[in-house]
Image (cartoon, rainbow, N blue to C red):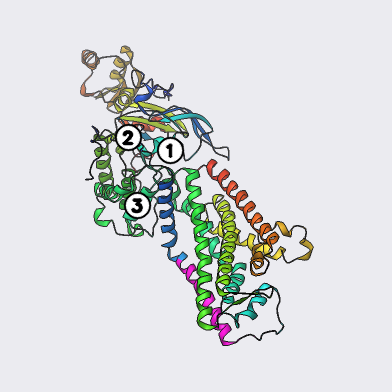
Amino acid sequence: MSTGLEITATGPAGDTTGPPLATAELAVATHGLTKRFRGGQLAVNQLDMVVPRGAVYGFLGPNGSGKTTTIRMLLGLVYPTSGSHELLATAMPSGSARVLPRVGSLVEGPAFYPQLSGRANLARIDAVDATADPRTSVARVSAALERVGLLAAAKKRYRAYSLGMKQRLAIAASLLQPRELIILDEPTNGLDPQGTREVRALIREIATDGITVLVSSHLLAEVEQICSHVGVMRTGRLVFQGTLEEMRARGAARVQVRTTNPGRASGVLESLGLADIQASDGEVSAQIGEHAPETVNRALVLADVPVAGFDTPRPSLEDLFVELTGEGFDVDG
Amino acid sequence: MSTAEAPPLPGGVARAAGGAARRGVVRPWLRMLRSELGLIFRRWRNLLLLAVLVGIPVLLGIALRVSVPRGGGGGGNGLGAAFLFQVAGNGVFLAFLALTIMLTLVLPLVVAVVAGDSLAGEASAGTLRYLLVVPAGRSRLLSVKYAAIVVFSLISCLLVAASALIMGVALFPVGPVTLLSGTTVPLSEGLLRLLFVVLYVSAAMAMLGAIGLALSSLTEHPIAAIAAIMIITVASEVSDNIPQFAVVQPYLPTHWWLSFDSLLRTPIDTTELTHGLLSIGVYIVIFCSIAWAKFSNADITS
């Protein structure tokens, strides 16, 4: 909080992502999007979200921070209390009939008809799509099933699918048509490590096709491995938004000195004007700020501090996320 | 894989912004309706209900054959009794009898199950959100759902009539039909009048379906919607038989359901029928509007 990390993304053009992007270059843009549910609970508060085209945008936040409500608003399932948003430069929800055929999505876990087979379920989804060509339906359903590795289980009832298969079927549904944007809400929720890897590989594949991916997760590791951009939500607010590198750069680097004389070492660091000095048994650390590590090291050695180890670690993304989202952030599932 | 009408566009992004190829409105709508009907008619639960609709007239026919009621004897009054005594003389009346008996509870129950499940079932299964992000379109989805309910109502009533007619022909003599007004018309005209009765009863069920659709849009629990439809039906039927409620009775949803007996008189009493159809139409308009108003503005959080 005190570290300057808590930048609230403002302005629809995304001032955290370098030069402002034209609306046409944005896959998702929200302007003060707010949702207050009937009970008075403020689920999403003044959200200004910017997802550039071609990005893999990791949408992070603890459970209950408003990610799913945001995604439901993006897709026109839930109407905002105030604010507006565009998908692929088309105003929503008024333009949903035009834009949603180009958007694939997985919302809050898979949901299909248990009595139907995987193939019949996708055929049902396809039959509902006014823009889908019925003549190519069978071929497109097969292609989507093949893409997620479910072709062999196509005739099996959805009821008999494992959780991983259900998730993959939902992803297949989002791939029935050529898409420009794919929105995946917690796609690896409840999956075993293998299933998680499979889904991650799928997302990478989708992204290499040039499709913009918005993937929400409460799992940091997932986002870190596949995403180019990050948005972090906390209690309905977007507390950080930018590229993964910008996120990393936000972390204040520290200098860490291992020494048998921590008292003298902290004295030197203090005289250099470093902030937040913490001394413990055999180790002293401080925020390095603008100082070059070699200058600090030299000052220590010249002051006869026995330096046994010297390091300038940046805080891990995990630390940053915990800082942004507060206690209770589920970092490893 | 298909004979490409257009060269593939570069990049993975194959569809241009305006290229959500308009395929007209009617054909995709019909495709969606077919999918909807496929869902309804491939569910074991619904098939079982339809089997019950076929089975009851069969049992009714056998029971009447075994113990032929005495013509002219007393006991019971009203439309059912009127038909009951006719069956022995003419098997066609088994169809009228079956429709009359089943219109009070069995047919409404069967329609209630499908109508109550229409939106609430999708909501409780979570499939509703996936239909809407396709996008199905809220009004479009609602219209398809209601059309499917109407088709299901029609098929239900046709099944009852067909089953009863077959049993009637098999077990009883068939010939020129003596109408309730005493006149006798040829068998062909009798069957034509039966068809109109089936259509009238189907319209009544479609009206109940509209009420069901509206209730189904209000809840995520299909059972709650189904129960509510049945409570409305039974409450209306009970109120319709309490003389003190005479003032409101013409406005009750079930009040005109049995007015199809006008179709079995010569001349046909059109005032009664018009009132009935008007009541059905008004209820359909009101409850479809309620369903639309609710559903098109609802936050889908299921």
Q: Chain of mark 2?
A: A
The answer to whether residue A299 is visible is yes
Point out residue B168 in the picture as x, y percentages from the top left corner: 54, 79
Say which of marks 1 and 2 sits in front.
Answer: 1
Q: Earlier in the sequence, mark 3 or mark 1?
A: 1
- Closer to us: B256 or A81: B256
The crowd level at tag 2 (other Cα within 10 Å; few <14, some 14-19, many 20+) is many
Q: What residue is disc 1 on? A: A97
Q: Chain of mark 3?
A: A
Q: Residue at left 40%, top 30%?
A: A324
Q: Are marks 1 and 2 on the same chain?
A: yes
Describe residue A228's horizontal placement relative to residue B151 as left or right. left
Q: What is the number of the mark on residue B38?
A: none
The crowd level at tag 3 (other Cα within 10 Å; few <14, some 14-19, many 20+) is many
Q: What residue is disc 3 on? A: A123
Start-end of magenta stretch: B47-69
Q: Against B98, is B15 above or below?
A: above
Say which of marks 2 and 3 sits in front.
Answer: 3
- Magenta stretch, overall SS: helix
Q: Are marks 3 and 1 on the same chain?
A: yes
Q: Is residue A290 magenta?
A: no
